[in-house]
Amino acid sequence: MFKKRKGKSMLFLRSLIFNIVGYSTLGVGCIVTSIIGVFSRKLTIKIWCHIFLPFLLLALKYLAGLSIEVRGKQYIQNGPALYASKHESALETYSLPAIVKYMAFVLKKELTYIPIFGWAQAFYGMIAVNRSGGGAAMKSMLKDARKRIEEGRPVAIFPEGTRIKPGLKGEYKSGLLFLAQNLKVPVVPIALNTGMFWRKSSFLRYPGKVIIEFLEPMPDNLDKKEFMSLLEERIESKCKEINEETVKNYPWSKVNLFEE
């Protein structure tokens, strides 16, 4: 009983220390971005991808004991591409741009309304979309995504549109398909297990190994239905495989795994 309590106390303490350091890093980064971005957007992007985010991941590893293993590196594109990622926690939004440099995310427009944080998103070049805006919102999203692609930057989108608990599957929405059809760049699926260690709305950061796996780019000769079906199958089957591996290596993590 004493060891169990001690383990919980240590988990809480390490999570507390990381959260203080981590959110302070993000706060400083947003402030710096809001200032420097007025003069140079390119510099703010480099600062995030080469300084703030790598530092954040180092803090996560050495303070919280949570490391990241990247698999399928051979599928990371050298040029512009569209990455379709599973979304289980905030961790992938911090780690993916540190892995695939200069990556811009498609995110909900409401996030850009937050003072300082929202300004940093705009200067970084995030693609804000009004999820209730219908066709006009889709066209605006495509316009901004095309600008990022023309700048030589990769674009990432979460096909389910929101965070989903590990083991569960949301509805794969048409925004990804719309971008894929119009941008004409490789589409790379991404599977991961971040929610097993960094749960949605949780204070705790569990120690272990997060796996982020890039999968083979999607074929470009499929019709709409075939494309979405294959994309979903690839991501979900790989996530299931990674989750099973995680539970095997960390039996306690099964409590963070949900079933349909």
Image: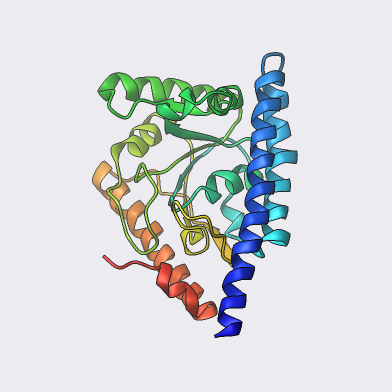
The quarter of the rendered structure image containing the N terminus is bottom right
What is the x, y in percent for residue 118?
53, 26
Residue appearing at x 73%, y 33% in the figure:
47
The quarter of the rendered structure image containing the C terminus is bottom left
Residue appearing at x 26%, y 24% in the figure:
134
Number of numbered discs on residues: 0
When the figure is inspected, residue 119 is found, relative to residue 238, above or below; the finding is above
Q: Residue furthest front?
A: 2
What is the x, y in percent for residue 13?
64, 62
Residue appearing at x 41%, y 25% in the figure:
142
Q: Left or right: 76 with respect to 189? A: right
Residue appearing at x 30%, y 18% in the figure:
136
The quadrant holding residue 106 is top left
Between 31 and 161, the residue placed more toward the observer is 31
The quadrant holding residue 148 is top right
Between 22 and 123, the residue placed more toward the observer is 22
Residue 232 visible at all: yes
Q: Left or right: 41 with respect to 145? A: right
What is the x, y in percent for residue 70?
61, 59
Between 140 and 210, the residue placed more toward the observer is 210
